[in-house]
Image (cartoon, rainbow, N blue to C red):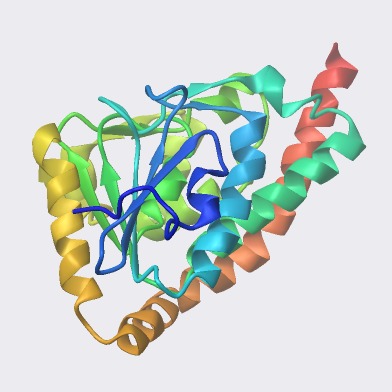
């Protein structure tokens, strides 16, 4: 049961056009990526809004567990590159870097458990899902990184750190260099996801796990989140800054080549 819209609904629930939010009375907040109510296309607006939403979510103590999911039969597979602006320009890239660093650091430092309900393929920002404490994936899910090598830029915005952490160093390097993909079943075998289920069961199972966590004392779950993410938080703080600097250099090189 979710909290109905009304006077008690926080204003930020409806402040971000590509993020649909619902919260159960026990404090399980579900954030669903979407575009016009359908499967999400990643845009410059979403790049700006997601870190801002994470700030609001983290400041609201009524949120006890976060569930991240997509819409329809995919987590996120499309991207509108033009909407991100001219990333070959230093001023634009500075804007992109500041948002990119904040989204990864705010996500990993969120003081509540995070469960990802991966409702199908995730070829754009799969790191958002794989960074979760518990990942429940549909058996139709396939993970990859479409944008970076396709655009000709280094994948330095945090995905390089997350893939290394959840897949292992050599496997992550191989998949990055070959622009490879891996299925939900492979991710389960490698330990990158916790459960693989039919699509229609994924969100319900994720919410059920979340309700179990929400029933525990809030200080316990808050400090569990902090404790369990210390290593990856430190790695993202170190790695995203350098990674995005190098990503920006390869973006600038695209203009030079043109």
> In the image, is residue 111 above or below residue 107?
below
How far across and down, in percent of the image, does residue 27 sit?
A: 31, 67
| Residue 71 at least partly seen | yes
How far across and down, in percent of the image, does residue 129 sit?
A: 38, 48
| Residue 109 at least partly seen | no
In the drawing, does residue 166 fall left or right of residue 41?
Answer: left
Q: Nearer the viewer, residue 27 or 83?
A: 27
Q: Residue at x 35, y 71 (%)?
A: 64
Q: Nearer the viewer, residue 114 or 133?
A: 114
| Picture quadrant of residue 199 | top left
In the drawing, does residue 164 fall left or right of residue 156?
Answer: left
In the drawing, does residue 248 fall left or right of residue 108?
Answer: right
> In the image, is residue 97 above or below residue 175?
below
How far across and down, in percent of the image, does residue 116 sit?
A: 31, 51
Q: Nearer the viewer, residue 156 or 214?
A: 214
Q: Residue at x 36, y 88 (%)?
A: 219
Q: Nearer the viewer, residue 52 or 47?
A: 52
Q: Residue at x 54, y 34 (%)?
A: 17
Q: Residue at x 26, y 46 (%)?
A: 117
In the drawing, does residue 226 fall left or right of residue 55?
Answer: left
| Picture quadrant of residue 103 | bottom right
- Image quarter (top left, top right, bottom left or bottom right) of the N terminus: bottom left
How far across and down, in percent of the image, does residue 164 sit?
A: 44, 55
- Image quarter (top left, top right, bottom left or bottom right) of the C terminus: top right
> In the image, is residue 219 above or below residue 119?
below
Considering every residue shown, the one lying at the far front of the view is 7
């Amino acid at each position: 049961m979710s909290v109905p819209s009304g006077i008690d609904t926080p204003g930020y629930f409806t402040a971000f056009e590509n993020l649909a939010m619902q919260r159960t009375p026990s404090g399980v907040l579900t954030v669903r990526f979407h575009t016009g109510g359908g499967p999400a296309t990643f845009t410059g607006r979403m790049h700006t809004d997601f870190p801002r939403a994470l700030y609001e979510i983290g400041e609201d103590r009524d949120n006890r567990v976060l569930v991240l999911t997509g819409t329809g039969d995919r987590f996120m597979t499309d991207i509108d590159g033009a909407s991100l602006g001219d990333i070959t320009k230093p001023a634009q890239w500075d804007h992109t870097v500041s948002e990119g660093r904040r989204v990864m650091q705010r996500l990993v430092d969120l003081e509540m458990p995070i469960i990802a309900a991966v409702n199908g393929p995730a070829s754009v920002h799969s790191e958002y899902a794989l960074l979760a404490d518990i990942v429940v994936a549909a058996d139709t899910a396939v993970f990859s990184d479409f944008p970076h090598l396709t655009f000709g830029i280094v994948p330095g915005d945090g995905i390089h750190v997350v893939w290394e952490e959840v897949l292992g160093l050599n496997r992550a390097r191989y998949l990055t260099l070959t622009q490879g993909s891996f299925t939900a079943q492979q991710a389960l075998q490698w330990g990158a996801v916790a459960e693989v289920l039919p699509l229609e069961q994924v969100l319900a199972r994720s919410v059920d796990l979340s309700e179990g966590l929400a029933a525990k004392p809030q200080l316990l779950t808050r400090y569990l989140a902090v404790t369990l993410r210390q290593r990856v938080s430190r790695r993202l703080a170190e790695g995203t800054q350098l990674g995005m600097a190098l990503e920006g250099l390869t973006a600038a090189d695209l203009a030079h080549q043109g």
